Image (cartoon, rainbow, N blue to C red):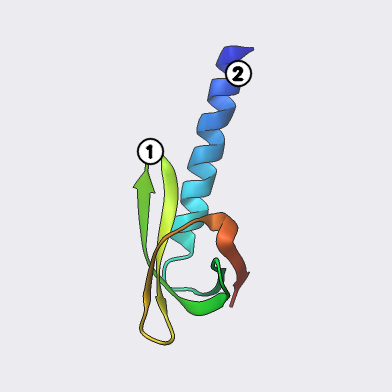
């Protein structure tokens, strides 16, 4: 059972990585602590196997460490 759980975790990690890479160049709406921000995904970074996005906001701000869970809309 533990081996199966480990394999499933690996599969989910690969799937999340594929989704994150697929967002590069896309315009997204991101939920932040205080509001929502619209911008373009420029980079995907992996920290401890978890994908994080870098988003260049329309106002020129660079958002780092954006998780897939913070993405509200892909335009």
> Residue at label 1?
48
* On screen, residue 56 above or below 1: below
Question: Circle 1 — which element?
Answer: loop
Residue at 58%, 64% in the rendered image: 71
**In this rendering, which labeled residue sits more in front, label 1 or label 2?**
1
Q: In terms of depth relative to the viewer, which is nearer, 14 or 45?
A: 45
Name of the residue lying farthest toward the bottom: 59
Question: Circle 2 — which element?
Answer: helix
Quadrant for the C terminus, please: bottom right
Residue at 48%, 65% in the rendered image: 23
Residue 28, by quadrant, is bottom right
Residue 3, by quadrant, is top right
Q: In terms of depth relative to the viewer, which is nearer, 48 or 15?
A: 48
> Residue at label 2?
4
Q: x%, y% of residue 36?
A: 57, 75
Q: Is residue 36 left or right of residue 46?
A: right
Q: Which numbered dot is residue 35?
A: none
Q: Within 10 Å of the Cα at label 1, are there few (<14), some (14-19), or many (20+) other Cα atoms? A: few
């Amino acid at each position: 059972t533990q081996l199966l759980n480990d394999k499933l975790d690996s599969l989910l990690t690969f799937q999340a990585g594929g989704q994150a890479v697929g967002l590069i160049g896309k315009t997204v709406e991101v939920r932040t602590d205080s509001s929502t921000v619209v911008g373009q995904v420029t980079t995907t970074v992996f920290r401890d196997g978890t994908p994080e996005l870098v988003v260049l906001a329309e106002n020129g701000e660079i958002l780092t460490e954006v998780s897939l869970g913070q993405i509200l809309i892909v335009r």
